[in-house]
Image (cartoon, rainbow, N blue to C red):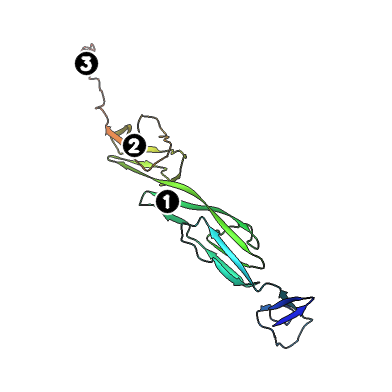
């Protein structure tokens, strides 16, 4: 599993195969039945191991450590990290070095073959929860979770015989939609009041056609 060449010791790290050969392995021998043109490429290195480092992970990731060179690394982290019930951090991206692949559609689990020392630094966006409440009506278009600095666009819909009057609690004003900047958790209330009675006119006609 080792050879000495020009004063350096090289370690056999396995092989990569094509055709009838197994696709890869980490031993110093391989056996297979040849049915097609095939190749076996032996992997040698003057280092047997690589180091996988992970940072900015809230202490919740897996995958950091020392690996045999060319072995498979799986780095995982949650999509959300909650700080109480109304604040959370959402995974948005990562920066990788070494053998770490470029970010793809799935950020929570990265699987790759590591041939050199590698690292991952996760990136997060802070989000706040926005709750709405109302009586005699409903509030639409609440996303529930908003990135810090984002704005709401809330629409009130009154029940029959009620009208929207204003926003209350962590909201204010009468604008529709209700646009509020989210820099902290919020509870926004829509206030609905009964519609005023409809004004009606009574006209009384005399028999001769006049009216009073």
Residue nearest the viewer, comparing 140 with 51: 51
Circle 1 Cα neighbour tier, 10 Å, few/some/many (<14 / 14–19 / ≥20): many
Find residue 172 and report its horizontal and vertical position in percent. Answer: 35, 31
Q: Position of residue 188 (x, y in %)?
A: 34, 39
Q: Which residue lies furthest to the front in this view?
A: 7
| Residue position for label 1 | 88
Determine the secondary structure under disc 2.
Answer: loop
The residue at the point 65 percent across, 61 percent down is 98
What residue sits right under mark 2 in the picture? Answer: 170
The residue lying toward the viewer, choosing from 181 and 125, is: 125
Residue 166, position as x, y percentages in the image? 33, 31
* Residue 50, quarter of the rendered image: bottom right
Q: Find out whether the residues at labels 3 and 1 contact each other: C-beta distance under 8 Å.
A: no
Residue 203 position (above or below residue 46): above
Could you give the CA–CA distance between mark 3 and mark 1, rounded to whole angstroms? Answer: 71 Å
User: In the rendered structure, which disc, 3 or 2, sits on the residue that comes first in sequence?
Assistant: 2
Q: In the drawing, does residue 108 fall left or right of residue 129?
A: right
Residues 166 and 111: in front is 111
Q: Which of marks 3 and 1 is in front?
A: 1
Q: Mark 3 points at which residue?
A: 205
| Residue at x-position 46% and y-position 57% | 58
Give percent across and percent down for residue 47: 67, 72
Q: Nearer the viewer, residue 190 or 67?
A: 67
């Amino acid at each position: 599993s080792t050879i000495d060449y020009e004063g350096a010791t090289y370690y056999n790290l396995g092989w990569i195969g094509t055709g009838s050969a197994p696709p890869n392995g980490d031993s110093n021998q391989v056996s297979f039945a040849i049915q097609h043109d095939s190749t076996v490429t032996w992997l040698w290195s003057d280092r047997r191991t690589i180091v996988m480092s992970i940072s900015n992970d809230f202490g919740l990731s897996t995958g950091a450590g020392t690996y045999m060179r060319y072995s498979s690394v799986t780095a995982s982290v949650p999509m959300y990290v909650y700080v109480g019930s109304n604040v959370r951090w959402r995974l948005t991206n990562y920066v990788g070095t070494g053998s770490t692949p470029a970010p793809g559609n799935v950020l929570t689990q990265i699987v790759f073959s590591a041939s050199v020392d590698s690292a991952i630094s996760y990136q997060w966006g802070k989000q706040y929860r926005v709750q709405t409440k109302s009586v005699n009506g409903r509030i639409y278009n609440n996303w529930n979770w908003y990135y810090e600095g984002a704005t709401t666009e809330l629409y009130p819909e009154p029940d029959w015989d009620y009208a929207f009057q204003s926003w209350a609690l962590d909201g204010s004003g009468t604008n529709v939609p209700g646009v509020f900047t989210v820099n902290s958790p919020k509870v926004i209330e829509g206030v609905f009041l009964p519609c005023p009675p409809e004004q009606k006119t009574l006209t009384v006609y005399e028999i001769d056609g006049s009216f009073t």
